[in-house]
Amino acid sequence: MKSSPKIYLAPFQGITGAVYHEIFARHFTGIDKFFTPFFTGVSRQKALKANITELVNTNSNAIPVVPQILSKDDREIIEFATHCTKKGFRGINWNLGCPFPRVASKQRGSGLLAHPRLVEQILGNVMPAISLKFSVKCRLGYHHPEEILKLVPVFNHYNISELIIHARTGKQLYKGDALTDDFERALNISTIPVVYNGDIFSVHDFLNASHRYPKINTWMIGRGILVDPLLPAHIKGIPICSEKKLPVRKFIDDLYFAYRKKMNDRLQAISIMKELWEYMAFSFENPHQVFKLVKRTKSFDDYEDAVSKIFHDFEWLGSESRQFSSGSI
């Protein structure tokens, strides 16, 4: 019989930073590890100073946090690892999964997956030079899912701590179906712990994936948790308040005011909340109407009125309504 599953919150650029982690941990349970949105350009002194400030704030959370770096520069990765070690982190994560063309076209993120020799060269320089755990988050490839079959032996050789695989190619972005057969082929040749990532939006999705991959007991979930922050607790069978709107409303309000404080009451705080609401709206009835109410707000008063109306007028359905899918956004 499997032990209780481990659940990691996937990094989402612009949404799941230190503020989100802190407020999430205050209101919900079920997450075993946070991953930061990727840091990049840390070899530049100005960027490094800003990043390290964020890392200090991030590491104050009770739930373990793994800083993530997006880079193809081995010296930059080593420098980042050195700073993270000094700040008390036990591991870092290398982003080989970002699918966006502006990143991938520069042979970074998932764009590196088409170049296994370069990946091997970078690992060959990085691994002997660092003392903390080094995990990799990747896709099945950039152009083709078969690319992973050349990469897994490289990851095996360098004995990375965890291999987190999003079961799509970079070219797919977040569209189409997860490539479950190709993921299974990669899983079968890996000698290191593998974490599954991709299209877990409900308990039903989790149970199907868990049945298909009995060797997997660690799961990274991103969009599913943005839609329904109660999903990790549901998956683990953790008791939840019967009136599910209450903890969600408190979470949303605390997050909003935390961003207002961080942004010195600039309207950018609303922009960040709108990004989250684009997903969370799918946990309410009439999700498109819900998001429309938030999207059109242009002031703090407008936003607060819209949120009050949503929680008063619309039923919370949560992830089990299964309104969200890969093609929803």
Image (tube, grey):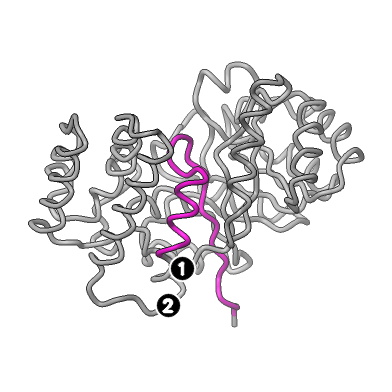
- Residue furthest to the bottom in view is 1
Which residue: 57% across, 66% down?
A: 6
- Residue 317 at x, y = what percent? 21, 62
Query: Is 7 situated left or right of 125 in this image?
Result: left
Quick one: quadrant of the C terminus?
Answer: top left
Which residue: 26% across, 59% down?
A: 249
For disc 2, the marked residue is 238
Q: Which contiguous range is marked in magenta?
A: 2-27
Query: Is 315 situated left or right of 30 in this image?
Result: left
Residue 223 colored in magenta in the image: no
Taking depth in this image into account, of 184 and 169 the one nearest to the observer is 169
| Structural distance between the alpha carbons of marks 2 and 1 | 8 Å
Amino acid type at image mark 2:
Ile
- Residue furthest to the left in view is 313
Work out whether mark 2 precedes mark 1 in sequence or the reverse, and give the earlier one. 1
Q: Disc count in the image?
A: 2
Query: Is 159 situated left or right of 162 in this image?
Result: right
- Residue 236 at x, y = what percent? 46, 74
Taking depth in this image into account, of 257 and 325 the one nearest to the observer is 257
Query: Are discs 2 and 1 less than 8 Å apart at CB?
Result: yes
- Residue 56 at x, y = what percent? 64, 44
For disc 1, the marked residue is 29
Mark 1 lies on a secondary structure that is loop
Quick one: quadrant of the N terminus?
Answer: bottom right
- Residue 197 at x, y = what percent? 53, 51
Which residue: 39% across, 53% down?
A: 224
Taking depth in this image into account, of 43 and 195 the one nearest to the observer is 43
Residue 106 location, quadrant: top right
Residue 233 location, quadrant: bottom left
Residue 207 location, quadrant: bottom left
Amino acid type at image mark 1:
Thr
